[in-house]
């Protein structure tokens, strides 16, 4: 244990911490109570345009999805799909909303991209805008915010 003020060791608070006898169950970790509501939504991290990707083995690069950046908010079975400017897109992508609703948690906030996936695996913004293309609509989640 350390004192938060000076970095010096702090005095033990009880016999168990001092190495004395423990209770029948021993010391118990503290557990934060579950949140009653999800945290507030903040602005998204956006990519920065550069002239060239960094080189070297320590860098990872990922595929660019050509779709809509969407926050998927789950709160006790209710789902909202929000654009990066917080426009509600839930009704536009009912299959995505239904998939998020099936997650085995009460609260979640996902950051991702809704995209139309063509048969060859590429994503197409035009296909996403034109629902008659028969393209598969997918949600690519890349951050779990809450």
Image: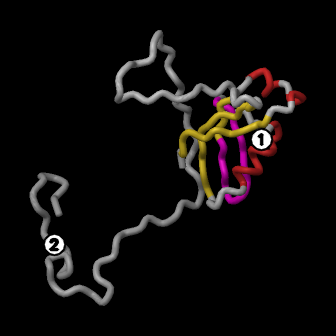
Q: How is the image coloured?
A: secondary structure
Q: Between residues 132 and 32, which one lies in front from this camera angle?
A: 132
Q: Quadrant of residue 78?
A: bottom right
**Is there CB contact under 8 Å for labels 1 and 2?**
no
Locate residue 71 relative to residue 55 in the image: left or right: right
The answer to whether residue 119 is above or below residue 17 is above
- Residue 39 position, x and y percent, is 55, 49
- Residue 127 position, x and y percent, is 80, 25
The answer to whether residue 137 is above or below residue 54 is below
The answer to whether residue 135 is above or below residue 17 is above
- Residue 62 position, x and y percent, is 52, 29
Locate residue 109 relative to residue 20 in the image: left or right: right
Task: Give the residue drawn at x 39%, y 28%.
Answer: 59
Task: Give the residue drawn at x 19%, y 87%.
Answer: 21
Locate residue 18 relative to residue 93 in the image: left or right: left
Q: Determine the CA span between mark 1 and mark 2.
A: 53 Å
Q: Between residues 93 and 140, which one lies in front from this camera angle?
A: 140
Locate residue 48 relative to residue 37 in the image: left or right: left
Q: Quadrant of residue 144?
A: top right
Residue underneath mark 1 = 90
Determine whether the residue tagged by mark 1 lies in a helix, strand or loop: helix
Q: Residues within 10 Å of mark 1 (few under 14, many from 20)?
A: some
Q: In the image as oriented, which residue stretches furthest toward the bottom?
A: 24
Q: Magenta includes 142?
A: no
What secondary structure predominates along the stretch shown in magenta? strand
Determine whether the residue tagged by mark 2 lies in a helix, strand or loop: loop
- Residue 33 position, x and y percent, is 48, 66
Residue underneath mark 2 = 12
Q: In the image as oriented, which residue stretches furthest toward the right?
A: 132
Locate the N terminus and report the quarter of the image it occupies.
bottom left
The answer to whether residue 91 is above or below residue 102 is above
Q: Which residues are magenta?
A: 72-84
């Amino acid at each position: 244990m350390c004192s938060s003020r000076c970095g010096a060791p702090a005095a033990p608070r009880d016999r168990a911490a001092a190495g004395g006898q423990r209770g029948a169950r021993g010391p118990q970790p503290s557990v934060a109570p579950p949140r009653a509501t999800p945290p507030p939504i903040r602005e998204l991290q956006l990519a920065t345009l550069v002239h060239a990707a960094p080189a070297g083995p320590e860098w990872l690069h990922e595929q660019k999805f050509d779709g809509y950046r969407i926050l998927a908010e789950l709160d006790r079975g209710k789902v909202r799909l929000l654009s990066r400017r917080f426009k509600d897109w839930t009704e536009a992508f009912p299959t995505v909303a239904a998939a998020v609703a099936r997650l085995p948690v009460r609260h979640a906030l996902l950051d991702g991209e809704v995209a139309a996936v063509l048969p060859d695996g590429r994503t197409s913004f035009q296909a996403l805008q034109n629902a008659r293309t028969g393209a598969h609509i997918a949600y690519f989640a890349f951050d779990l915010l809450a």
